[in-house]
């Protein structure tokens, strides 16, 4: 993996193509048909931690490259991932870059597509079912609902390095009905205090959902000012939802994994 990409100097060897495929939120059944078809054609699959490994079964002829991205620890740095994609395509390969959720929702798919464009590599974006919508849905929480929530914001709860989250907290706290934080477990205390300081009511319903859409899914619901005491058992990957739509969880819950934990 340390090998640098090289220019294809053979005029008889055509440049390959890279498909940036969204693998969905976890449940392998939520992969799109197009994503499945491209996996079946792939010579190379470059995948990370958030893509369900069961999806690799759809790529029987592919060589797999695990780039192992996780919060605060990238087995392969992003610039090297870009180089891998370029290198393999320049060797004439059909490459699938398999990413969790949707490539363009906090997945750095835009950065990878930009690197491919600058290198002259053909690529295609295959949207995936984003966890920002699917995970709440599996917990019986619609992110919008007539008469309750007419607006929703998807927010990263993680930033690289020691930097604090640089967000317009007042706009999120007072101007958006439903706020969905992805990758926010490690910064949960900061997120909660920032929302409260910016004017969000301490009684606002909130939910934490770990391993959403999978049999291991856990759901904790409570109020904004008390959720930290309830969140000790929740570990990444998890989604944090702030808004009145969380009250619908008790009515609309339909997914009942054996390990579900609901705390009121």
Image (cartoon, rainbow, N blue to C red):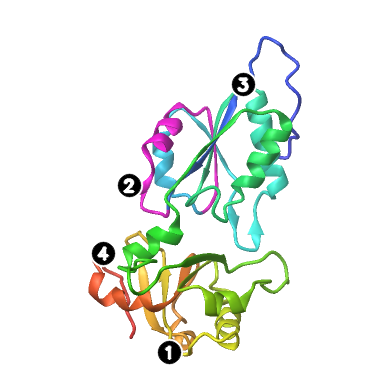
Look at 72% across and 13% down and name the residue there: 10
Q: Is residue 69 within the magenta segment?
A: no
Callout 2 environment at 10 Å: few (<14), some (14 to 19), or many (20+)?
few
What is the secondary structure assignment of the residue under circle 1? loop
Of the image marks 1 and 4, the number of the one nearer the N terminus: 1
**Residue 205: x, y in percent?**
40, 82
What is the secondary structure assignment of the residue under circle 2? helix
In this view, 90 is above or below 154:
above
What is the secondary structure assignment of the residue under circle 3? loop
**Residue 201: x, y in percent?**
48, 88
Residue stretch rendered in magenta on the structure? 25-49
Q: Which residue is mark 4?
A: 255
Of the image marks 4 and 3, the number of the one nearer the N terminus: 3
Q: Is residue 244 left or right of residue 257?
A: right
Q: Which residue is mark 2?
A: 29
Of the image marks 1 and 2, the number of the one nearer the N terminus: 2
Q: CA distance from mark 2 to mark 3?
A: 30 Å
Q: CA distance from mark 3 to mark 1?
A: 57 Å
**Residue 182: x, y in percent?**
52, 65
Q: Which residue is mark 1?
A: 203
Comparing labels 1 and 4, the label whose residue is closer to the camera? 1
Q: Is residue 118 left or right of residue 101?
A: right
Comparing labels 3 and 1, the label whose residue is closer to the camera? 1
Of the image marks 3 and 1, the number of the one nearer the N terminus: 3
Q: Which residue is mark 3?
A: 92
Q: CA distance from mark 1 to mark 4?
A: 26 Å
Look at 63% across and 27% down and name the residue there: 89
């Amino acid at each position: 993996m340390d090998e640098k990409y090289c220019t294809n100097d053979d005029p008889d060897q055509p440049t390959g193509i890279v498909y940036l495929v969204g693998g969905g939120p976890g449940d392998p059944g939520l992969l799109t048909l197009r994503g499945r078809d491209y996996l079946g054609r792939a010579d190379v699959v470059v995948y990370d931690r958030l893509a369900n490994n069961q999806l690799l079964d759809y790529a029987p002829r592919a060589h797999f490259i695990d780039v192992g991205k996780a919060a605060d620890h990238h087995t392969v740095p992003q610039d090297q991932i870009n180089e891998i994609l370029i290198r393999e395509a320049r060797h004439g390969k059909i490459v699938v870059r398999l990413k969790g959720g949707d490539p363009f929702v906090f997945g750095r798919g835009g950065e990878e597509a930009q690197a491919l464009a600058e290198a002259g590599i053909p690529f295609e974006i295959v949207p995936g079912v984003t966890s920002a919508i699917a995970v709440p849905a599996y917990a019986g929480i619609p992110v919008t609902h007539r008469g309750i929530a007419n607006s929703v914001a998807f927010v990263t709860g993680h930033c690289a390095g020691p930097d604090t989250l640089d967000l317009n907290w007042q706009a999120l706290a007072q101007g958006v009905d439903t706020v969905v934080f992805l990758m926010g477990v490690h910064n949960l205390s900061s997120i909660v205090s920032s929302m409260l300081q910016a004017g969000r009511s301490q009684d606002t319903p909130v939910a934490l959902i770990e391993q959403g859409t999978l049999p291991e899914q856990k759901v904790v619901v409570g109020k904004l000012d008390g959720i930290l005491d309830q969140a000790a058992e929740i570990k990444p990957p998890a989604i944090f939802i702030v808004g009145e739509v969380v009250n619908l969880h008790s009515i609309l819950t339909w997914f009942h994994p054996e390990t579900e934990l609901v705390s009121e």
